[in-house]
Amino acid sequence: MSAPVNRPTFLTVLCFLTFMSAVSGLWTQSERLWNPGITADKTRETFEAVRENLDRQGSTAQSKTMDKMFEAVIEQTTAKNIKTSAIIMLIVESLSLYAAYLMWNLQRRGYYLYLGGIAVAFLAPLLMIGGWMGAITAMAGVFLSIFMAIFYAFNLKHMY
């Protein structure tokens, strides 16, 4: 019979949050993968609405720069790019889920796998999508994960 796992409460909470986030992400990215055209249309509509709101606020040099950025993103929001993004994020969410499972079982290699998933989430959109769309996808993919990685790092002393 094996000894009971003595997992710190903070690590338990982090793993649980990662489990929930990864499962939710897998579901969301699956929907995006199966309906990339619909997702692209909705995303373009959202960006166009935001751009129109910025246009109403005034015509400064900053707003003209933002308008050019929004135009580039809207042009790059295609079904193909949505599909590529969904595949990348399905891989990232799968890596995160397995990494959390390993850390749940106090295996340090789960942390390094989690960091690898963050690297994939950042680099793959830049390389495979490119432009503003790739940059936005990359930033969105790693924003909260970086904080989670820092919190997980505090728990490395409990992992073997």
Image: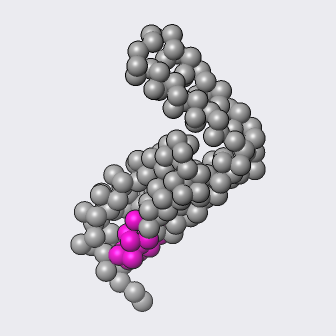
Say whether residue 4 is magenta.
no
Relative to the observer, which residue lies in front, 134 or 104? 134
**Residue 45, position as x, y percentages in the image:** 65, 27
Span of residues in magenta: 101-115
Residue placed at 59% from the left, 51% from the top? 129
Q: In this view, does 61 lie to the left or right of 70?
A: left
Say if 14 sits above or below 65 in the image: below
Res 147 seen here: yes
**Residue 18, position as x, y percentages in the image:** 45, 57
Relative to the observer, which residue lies in front, 152 or 158? 152
Residue lying furthest bottom = 1
Say whether residue 113 is magenta.
yes
Query: Where does the N terminus fall, quadrant-wise?
Result: bottom left
Res 23 seen here: no
Query: Where does the C terminus fall, quadrant-wise?
Result: bottom left
**Main SS, magenta residues:** helix
**Residue 120, position as x, y percentages in the image:** 49, 62
Residue placed at 40% from the left, 65% from the top? 115
Residue placed at 44% from the left, 67% from the top? 116
Say if 155 sits above or below 36 in the image: below
**Residue 107, position as x, y percentages in the image:** 38, 77
Relative to the observer, which residue lies in front, 97 or 35? 35
Q: Is residue 83 left or right of residue 140?
A: right
Residue placed at 69% from the left, 42% from the top? 78
Say if 114 sits above or below 1 in the image: above
